[in-house]
Amino acid sequence: MDHNMDVLLKNNNKKASPPPVTITRVAPLRKLYGLTLIASFVVIVATCVYTSGRFSGTMTPSEMQLPDHLPASHPEVLQALRSTFLLPPSKLPYNLSKDPDYLATSHADTWGIIHYHLSRLFSGERGGFFVEAGALDGQQLSNSLWLEQELGWTGLLVEPDPYSFLHLGHKHRKAWTSNACLSSDAFTRRSVHVALKPRPGYRNNYPWFMRGSSHELGVKLATKSAEEVETLQYYLNRGEESYMVTYCFPLHSYLLALNITKVDLLSLDTQGSEIEIIKSIPWEEVEVRVVVMEVADRTHYQSDLVEYMRGKGYFLVGRFMDYIFVREGDSAHTRLLSHKDWQLVVHV
């Protein structure tokens, strides 16, 4: 019995021989596919970790209960912006669209004319600060993206449409972002915004054209030429409206919350409220160097606006669908005047 037990233990303690190793040659495409899956997983995890860090411990804008008609510098306003309505610049690599149909419209409309002026005004200037209201998805028709990428600027992107803002967050812009709107006066308020999107089943290669036409309920949209009105109506008739309540903050509130006293570029494309926003700025407390703004009435020269800005010390350097103003005596103004071929370019 003891002998048999010893034999059994001896046999159990023997190390089993390892199975023969079979080397399988993986096709290059399968290797690449596997590496792609791993890389995608890493990016998703990193995005989730980063996003959770941005939102943890704060309420979402829809959960915030903030009284209307608070002044720009009210402590509750600044606290709400810092804790809920302002998301910090992304530290992740840019995630910009490369879709050909998308890129075909990203620099359409008046983008080229605006870029022509801004590239002269800010030639070689690094590290500036911009505010772009009506930021859409942060890439389509953006007046500030090139300043980030080419000159290392940062800034603030304000977009009230939740769908557009969601896409804006995915672009990983190097600027503060806010899912709200700029107030048309010096106080906080809530407003109803009309968001537009293609109707179900309607194939539209330019969905951001509709998204860019989202606006505050009751605000007069831009008056355009007969041809533009026909094109706009064609798209709007194929759009589906949705309504949402949005918080609106004075521009000054944002700047106070971010401890910013100088804005190098203020870009306003808010579908009708631009002039009211401009007139709500406390110019004695905020330095704004260059203003780009869409105007509601594109068929007539905005003499009242030009005179108002002239009284604030600004020089009109571009007039078309958008007006471009530069603060007189600013280095950007001096740089522009130094061009021998410079003249006021009027596009009607």
Image: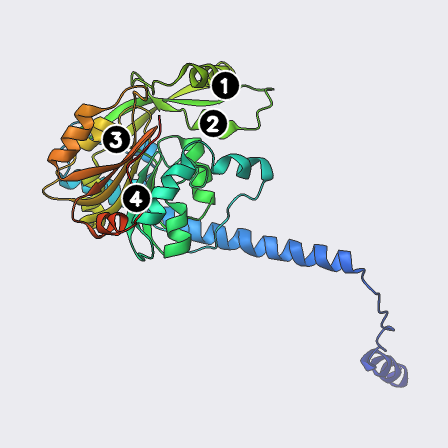
Q: Name the residue under label 4.
A: 342
Q: Which of 105 and 318 is in front in this view?
A: 318
Type of the residue with mark 1: Tyr
Would you say 46 lies left or right of 162 here?
Answer: right
Q: Nearer the viewer, residue 306 or 169?
A: 306
Q: Name the residue under label 1.
A: 235
Type of the residue with mark 2: Phe
Q: Of tags 2 and 4, which is closer to the observer?
A: 4
Q: Total number of numbered labels?
A: 4
Residue drawn at x 35%, y 23% is 215
Marks 2 & 3, CB-CB < 8 Å contact: no
* Earlier-in-chain disc, 1 versus 3: 1
Query: Tag 2's secondary structure?
Result: helix
Marks 4 & 1, CB-CB < 8 Å contact: no
Would you say 320 lies left or right of 65 here?
Answer: right
Q: What x and y, as percent, mark residue 10?
A: 84, 83
Q: What x and y, as percent, mark residue 167?
A: 46, 38
Q: Mark 3 points at which residue?
A: 248
10 Å crowding of disc 4: few (<14), some (14-19), many (20+): few
Query: Tag 1's secondary structure?
Result: helix
Residue drawn at x 38%, y 52% is 148
Residue 78's mark?
Answer: none
Residue drawn at x 15%, y 27% is 69
Residue 75, by quadrant, is: top left
Q: Mark 2 points at which residue?
A: 209
Residue drawn at x 17%, y 39% is 314
Q: Considering the image in quadrants, where does the C terminus appear?
A: top left
Q: Distance between the residues labelled 3 and 4?
A: 38 Å
* Earlier-in-chain disc, 2 versus 3: 2
Type of the residue with mark 3: Cys
